[in-house]
Amino acid sequence: MLSWLVIPLVSGIVSSSANFTLGGIHRELWQSVLGDRYFIMCLPPLVLLAAVGLSQVRPSWISGVSLIVLLSLSARADFRYYSYPHKEDWRGATAYVVSHALPKDGILFYLSRGRFGFDYYVRRLNPEAQTWQIVFPEPYDWTDVEAMKQPSNSLVGTAPKGYERVWLVLSHNDFNSMRQMETHFIERTLQGNFPDVKEQEFQGVRVLLYQQK
């Protein structure tokens, strides 16, 4: 039971910190796997070991009280999880953009995979006319998503020249400091060309509209 519980945790820590240097370029071979979804396999031994521990507590009424406390904490966590859903509201974000987009509008996605949800709900909404243009990612390389996470600096700098307004759709942009820095650069660059910024918040998605005053 202890091996079942500990070995996956240790393996995850080791693999997440492993790095490899090739040709002077520092490359990370493995993405971090230190997330709860990857360690669900550790839940059965944890529960079984807790049950064994409770069964050894004497007198028995203490184990009963301990069990009630554990169940209460679990119920509280379940209540919070279902009260505050983590699902991204791509339906609402897409409907907002589609209903407010004008001809010659450009749309940038950061991270690029946000276009998956957007395109899906565009097909569901089936607007009469697609008046906007996708600036990034376009064309979309579905086979190399990792290489197209964010638009290049040159693309962000030149994009405003071809559009009267630019939409910036943000998702998963605040998971680490690097993504936050990239997001701030994109926002500052766009605002330098379009000083009037309107922002709309959705669950897990931010939509910013850049336009002239």
Image: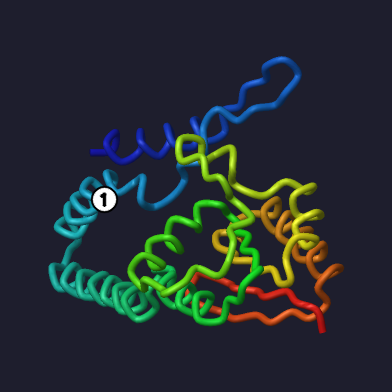
Label 1: how many Cα within 10 Å (few below 14, some 14–19, many 20+)? few
Image point 36% across, 78% down: which residue? 80
The mark tally for this picture is 1
Q: Residue furthest bottom?
A: 213
Q: Secondary structure at mark 1?
A: helix
* Colour setting: rainbow
Residue that numbered label 1 is attached to: 43
Point out residue 114 in the picture as x, y percentages from the top left corner: 50, 58
Q: Residue furthest top?
A: 23
Locate the N terminus by quadrant: top left
Locate the C terminus by quadrant: bottom right
- Relative to 120, 205 lies left or right: right
Q: Nearer the viewer, residue 42 or 158?
A: 158
What amino acid type is highlighted by mark number 1?
A: Leu
Point out residue 170 in the picture as x, y percentages from the top left corner: 59, 64
Image point 58% across, 49% down: which residue? 138
User: Which quadrant of the view contains residue 119?
Assistant: bottom left
Point out residue 185 in the picture as x, y percentages from the top left corner: 79, 58
- Relative to 28, 36 lies left or right: left
Q: Nearer the viewer, residue 112 or 58?
A: 112
- Relative to 194, 133 lies left or right: left
Image point 42% across, 32% down: which residue? 11
Q: Nearer the viewer, residue 11 or 128?
A: 128
Point out residue 18 in the picture as x, y percentages from the top left corner: 56, 28
Image point 23% across, 55% down: which residue? 50
- Relative to 158, 55 lies left or right: left
User: Which quadrant of the view contains residue 187?
Assistant: bottom right
